[in-house]
Amino acid sequence: MAFKASEETTKTAFQAGMEPPMRKRPFPTEITVLHKGQNYPINVDEEINIDPLNFQDACYDQPGKFAWYSAVHAGAMTLVDRTKRSLEVTKGRVATRFRGTKDVNTGKTFSETAIDKLLDTDPEVIEAYERYVSAQEQEYLLKAVKEAFVHRRDMLTQIGADRRQELRDKGF
């Protein structure tokens, strides 16, 4: 059974003379970006928005914004690598501390399997893991924003083509 929209439901907010409501975004629209030790609060919607009245400004800003977010994303990927390495070093240091020690219940030396299980509960390892996950989250968000700028570039290109076609149609 096909859905049949009534005339009322097909009338858009734009046709009614109202601003269309903002859709809920699947990702946070306000993020804090860490770059070279500085925190930058960013409103992603404002950064990506294309103002039809300032189309040229959006075109001029696009390369610089894309380059900045690409650089910040590269820094975030480096931070992920560093925190992953730090996690591995922390695990190794804590595992070394457990090797050679004896279990108080059995009096036997810890096996590698037991040490692996103990690592998951060690506060140092947990803290290093949390830093790693936090760095990954930052990298994922920045990758999404960077990819949104690729889509923004495509939209700017299409809007420009549409405007040129409108001028041609009007005889300019």
Image (spheres, rainbow, N blue to C red):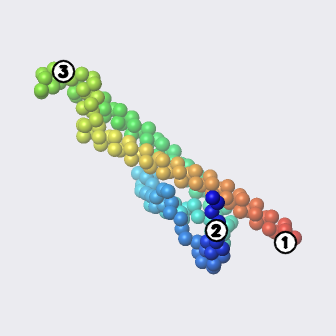
**Label 1 crowd (10 A; few <14 / some 14-19 / many >=20):** few
Q: SS of the residue at dot 1?
A: loop
Mark 2 vs mark 3: give the one in front. Answer: 2
- The answer to whether residue 19 is left or right of residue 121 is right
- Kind of residue at disc 2: Ala
In whole angstroms, how far apart are the C-alphas of marks 2 and 3? Answer: 72 Å
- The answer to whether residue 88 is left or right of residue 3 is left
Question: How many discs appear?
Answer: 3
In whole angstroms, how far apart are the C-alphas of marks 2 and 1? Answer: 34 Å
Residue matched to label 3: 109
* Label placed on residue 5: 2
Q: Report the quarter where the N terminus lies.
A: bottom right
Mark 2 vs mark 1: give the one in front. Answer: 2
* Label placed on residue 8: none
The quadrant in which residue 114 appears is top left
| Res 90 seen here | yes
Q: Work out whether 92 lies above or below 3.
A: above
Q: SS of the residue at dot 2?
A: loop
At horizontal 59% and vertical 64% (from top left) the residue drawn is 49
- Kind of residue at disc 1: Lys
Q: SS of the residue at dot 3?
A: loop
Residue matched to label 1: 170
Mark before the other along the chain sequence, 2 or 3: 2
- Kind of residue at disc 3: Thr
In whole angstroms, how far apart are the C-alphas of marks 1 and 3? Answer: 86 Å
- The answer to whether residue 16 is left or right of residue 134 is right
Counting from the top left corner in percent of width and height, residue 171 is at 87, 70
Mark before the other along the chain sequence, 2 or 1: 2
Mark before the other along the chain sequence, 1 or 3: 3
At horizontal 31% and vertical 34% (from top left) the residue drawn is 90
- The answer to whether residue 166 is left or right of residue 31 is right
